[in-house]
Structures are given as C-alpha cells and as structure tokens.
Image (spheres, grey):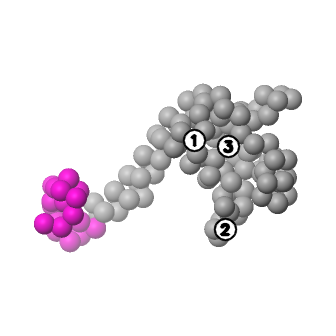
C-alpha cells in the first residue's frame, strides 16, 4: 500500500484524504487507530500519529477522547475546495500560460477540452 518516495506519514495522510474524497470514509466515520496502522502495516506508531496530527491540523480528522479518530464533518468539502484550487494552480494556470506563449487562444484550449482531444 505504501511504496512511494514520500515519507510514510505523508503517504498515510494522502491515503486517508483520498478515502475521504472518494467517499470510502464518510463524515463521523471512525478511522483505524495508530496502533491498528502500526500493526496492519508494520510501521512505527509514531509515524501514523504524525499523519493523524497533520490531518487533525487540517480539520480532516478529529479525536474523541478515549474512543479514537473520526472524519470531521465537512472534511470532504474542505478537501474538494483545496484540491480544486490546487488543480487550477498546478494544472490549468500553467497550461494557460504555455498557450499564451505559443499564441494559442484560450478559447482553443477550452474547445479542445470540451471535445476531448485533438481536432
């Protein structure tokens, strides 16, 4: 499951974010504990705890004292908002900038996207 180059805690946090975005984890649903992550994936519990701390700071998860970690209400919507902003900043804006450099009207880029490929 975790085999990328990013630090393991980042991969764990990214997987939980992806699960929230896809609906595999819903608001108020409990997530595995740090101990369960450590046992299941044979990792240090501190690694999972670091991922959870990051997600709590982002308001994706929250802790119920003595019970565990849960998906925060509105987490999916917040993640979607951030992902959409990142998509425009990282994907669309560079495409528009390159199109301008090449003298391609933005309307042509939009038409290309609407038609699903080359003309």
Label 1 neighbour load within 10 Å: few <14, some 14-19, many 20+: few
Q: Are marks 2 and 1 in contact (CB under 8 Å)?
A: no
Q: Is residue 93 left or right of residue 67?
A: left
In this orientation, does residue 109 appear?
no
Of pointers 2 and 1, the one earlier in the residue sequence: 2
The mark closer to the camera, 2 or 1, is 1
Residue 62 position, x and y percent, is 71, 33
Label 3 neighbour load within 10 Å: few <14, some 14-19, many 20+: many
As helix, strand or loop, the secondary structure at mark 2 comes to loop
Q: Are marks 3 and 1 in contact (CB under 8 Å)?
A: no
Question: Which residue is denoted by mark 1 in the rendering?
Answer: 24
Highlighted magenta segment, given as a residue range: 98-119
As helix, strand or loop, the secondary structure at mark 1 comes to loop
As helix, strand or loop, the secondary structure at mark 3 comes to helix
Mark number displayed over residue 3: 2
Residue 119 against residue 65 in the figure, above or below: below
Q: Gap between marks 2 and 3, in whole Å?
A: 20 Å
Q: Is residue 105 left or right of residue 59?
A: left
Residue displayed at 18% across by 56% down: 115
Residue 83 position, x and y percent, is 47, 47
Of pointers 3 and 1, the one earlier in the residue sequence: 1
Residue displayed at 84% across by 54% down: 39
Question: Which residue is denoted by mark 3 in the rendering?
Answer: 55
In this orientation, does residue 97 appear?
yes
Label 2 neighbour load within 10 Å: few <14, some 14-19, many 20+: few
Residue displayed at 48% across by 41% down: 80
Image quarter for residue 29?
top right
Mark number displayed over residue 13: none
Q: Is residue 102 left or right of residue 28?
A: left
Name the outermost residue toward the left. Answer: 119
């Amino acid at each position: 499951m975790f085999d990328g180059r990013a630090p393991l805690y980042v991969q764990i946090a990214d997987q939980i974010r992806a699960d929230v975005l896809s609906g595999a984890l819903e608001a108020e649903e409990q997530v595995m504990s740090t101990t369960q992550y450590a046992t299941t994936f044979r990792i240090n519990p501190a690694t999972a705890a670091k991922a959870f701390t990051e997600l709590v700071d982002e308001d994706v998860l929250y802790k119920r004292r003595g019970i565990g970690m849960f998906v925060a209400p509105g987490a999916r919507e917040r993640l979607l908002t951030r992902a959409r902003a990142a998509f425009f900043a990282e994907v669309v804006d560079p495409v528009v900038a390159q199109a301008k450099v090449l003298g391609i009207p933005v309307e042509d880029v939009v038409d290309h996207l609407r038609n699903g490929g080359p003309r």
